[in-house]
Amino acid sequence: MTLSRAELARLVDHTLLKPEATTADVAALVAEGAELGVYSVCVSPSMIPPSVPDGLLVATVCGCPSGKHTSAVKAAEAAESITNGADEVDMVIDIGAALAGDFGAVQADIAAVRAATKGVVLKVIIESAALTDDAIVGACKAAVAAGADFVKTSTGFHPAGGASVHAVELMRKTVGPDMGIKASGGIRTAEAALEMIAAGATRLGLSSTRAVLDGVGPVDGTTPTGDAGY
């Protein structure tokens, strides 16, 4: 598929969730995100509010990375982040509940955070690499039923891995054409990013954003020799 550098950038949540991140690191992330023209920067709740220029949104996470927080704690964390300036919230489900087939519990967990995030985009991280296909389908259906805006593949912290084309395709098949899908975790090249989009992703969580965009084309929007397929 063909996307310009600028078009791809507008699908990116430029992400820094490392526990050792400092305020200076976040300021550098914001500056780089603004330069690259990304959709948002995604930072930990304790790093909100970063100072961002107009047009650059702020995303954050709750229940991250384990998903084993109680629903009340996740909801409170999300609500506080919104009060502090977050425009979008990415929550982690209870992965064990999904693996056990308890999708009622998964839906209730998402619904609790949804109630605390009305008017704000809610993305549901299912940690797809750690799930069976049946669990991916069940978790996605729970997210739809709970009123989430996106389903998201991964936190990027799980040892099982990050996003895969197979998971994104299965997620798209499950949620239908209208719900957002965010692919994240281990996407470090333009080729991988474009494969995720072709599979059905409508947003990308990237920490290697500049390297990915450089694989599409330079800042002037032209395509470098050898990358015409992008």
Image: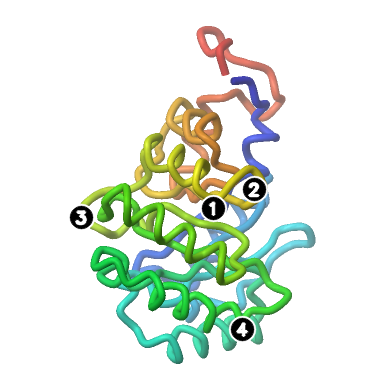
Q: Classify mark 1: residues with Cα within 10 Å, few (<14), some (14-19) or many (20+).
A: many
Name the residue: 62% across, 52% down.
179
Q: CA distance from mark 1 to mark 3?
A: 21 Å
Indicate whether 226 appears above or below 29.
Answer: above
User: What residue is pinned by disc 2?
Assistant: 38
Callout 2 amino acid: Val
Mark 2 or mark 3, which has the lower sequence index? 2
**Marker disc for residue 115:** 4
Q: Classify mark 3: residues with Cα within 10 Å, few (<14), some (14-19) or many (20+).
A: few
- Quadrant containing the C terminus is top right
The reply to whether callout 1 and callout 3 are in contact (CB within 8 Å) is: no
User: What residue is pinned by disc 1?
Assistant: 14
Q: CA distance from mark 2 to mark 3?
A: 27 Å
Q: CA distance from mark 4 to mark 2?
A: 28 Å
Instruction: Find numbered disc 3 in the image and state the secondary structure of the residue it sits on.
Output: loop
Relative image position of residue 36 (x, y in whole percent): 64, 43
User: What residue is pinned by disc 3?
Assistant: 159
